[in-house]
Amino acid sequence: MRVLVTGGAGYIGSHTVGRLVAGGHTVSVLDSLEHGHRAAVAEVPLHVGDVRDTALVGEILRAQRSEAVIHFAASKSVAESVADPGRYFEMNVTGSLSLLRAMAETGVRRLVLSSTCAVYGTPDDLPVAESSPIRPENPYGESKYLMERMAGWFEGAHGVRTAALRYFNAAGAALDGSNGEDWRNAENLVPAVMKVAAGRTPVVDVFGTDYPTPDGTAIRDYVHVLDLADAHVLALEYLMGGGRGATLNLGTGQGASVLDVVAAARAATGRPIETRERPRRPGDPSAIWADGRLARDILGWEPRHDLAEIVASAWRWHTSHPDGFGSSAIERRSPGATPSGVLR
Ligand SMILES: NC(=O)c1ccc[n+]([C@@H]2O[C@H](COP(=O)([O-])OP(=O)(O)OC[C@H]3O[C@@H](n4cnc5c(N)ncnc54)[C@H](O)[C@@H]3O)[C@@H](O)[C@H]2O)c1
């Protein structure tokens, strides 16, 4: 299958590109490289540009004769979205609208969307099913829900069938440590813990130690990035096989507390990893984990990597790439890109 991956040079996107290529699909990437890295997708053509440029997206879709799109390109910081909501609606809503319009114009009718459990806000019941109330508590979650809703209208009008995948907490790295999350941009717990294990920062801040959870710290559903990547390939194949539009949680169905993650990281790294108690952060739910049955039923997706594998693979990546993709030794040119890196 010929697939355009927007944001494919980023963390989850580049792992998905790897899985698509391994599965025999023909892949090209559109990424602004605001947070992505050329070296993460060195094996496929990379078009450096902005998904909000509808003409550029249409041009790439036509030139590649794309049959489907996987849309990762977005801004993803919750804190930044609260401080600057306009940027989030611009990047995530306008960006998705631009892509949908280009797809409608070029007749590309299969779309896999990166959505998030942030659409649920603080859930009433656990685990969280797709039918749970939608109550985003920040502009980031709201922008992703608006993206899902827009895609629904494009299905009715233009036949763009969409699988919207609501990820829980993406974490971990390629098992051989060759690809992972660039911790210079990452605000998530696993990279923060790894920074302390590596001696880059002295202590892990634990925000909230008085939650109504067994150890008092917040619980999340950590899902390995390779499992997420596999789910995208399955979703694409499901849509190409005639599957109907669907909205699916991608989580393991198991929660881990902040202290569980720290303990798993201590075991994987052999480092002490100090923690410091801090007050709760506004808008952080005490616990959230997924009811992932629908993705298993519809896609046949089964997460294969546990928390121990998440932290062990992340440690392999961070120790072999202490500056992420920042070290010049690993920057390489992608095939198929023009000198400026832009297709046109
Ligand atoms: N990481 C998580 O835990 C998580 C959880 C839920 C949902 N998501 C969603 O998954 C997607 C990928 O997340 P990630 O963790 O890989 O983030 P990332 O920042 O590593 O990847 C996003 C990529 O999109 C590119 N990009 C951003 N805006 C663009 C634009 N306007 N045009 C072209 N390219 C653009 C960036 O350069 C980057 O390479 C995002 O949509 C995010 O909202 C992530």
Image (cartoon, rainbow, N blue to C red):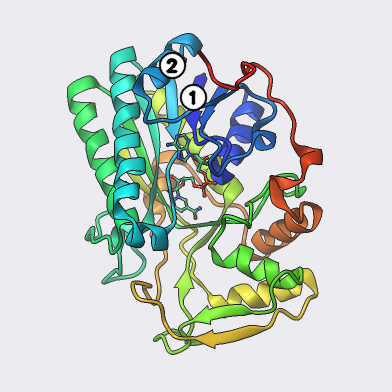
SS at mark 2 in the image: helix
Q: Residue at x 30, y 41 (%)?
A: 93
Residue indicated by mark 2:
61
Q: Nearer the viewer, residue 82 or 2?
A: 82
Residue 98, given in percent of the width and then of the height, sits at 32, 28
Q: In the rendered structure, which amino acid carries the disc numbered 2?
A: Leu
Q: Is residue 106 above or below residue 228?
A: above
Q: Can the viewer see residue 335?
A: yes
Residue 59, given in percent of the width and then of the height, sits at 42, 13
Report whether 282 appears left or right of 29: left
Residue indicated by mark 1:
4
Label 2 residue near ligand 1, CB within 8 Å = no
Binning the other alpha carbons within 10 Å of mark 1 as few (below 14), some (14 to 19) or many (20 upward) gives: many
Q: Residue at x 76, y 68 (%)?
A: 198
3D distance between C-alphas at marks 2 and 1: 7 Å
Residue 251, given in percent of the width and then of the height, sits at 46, 56
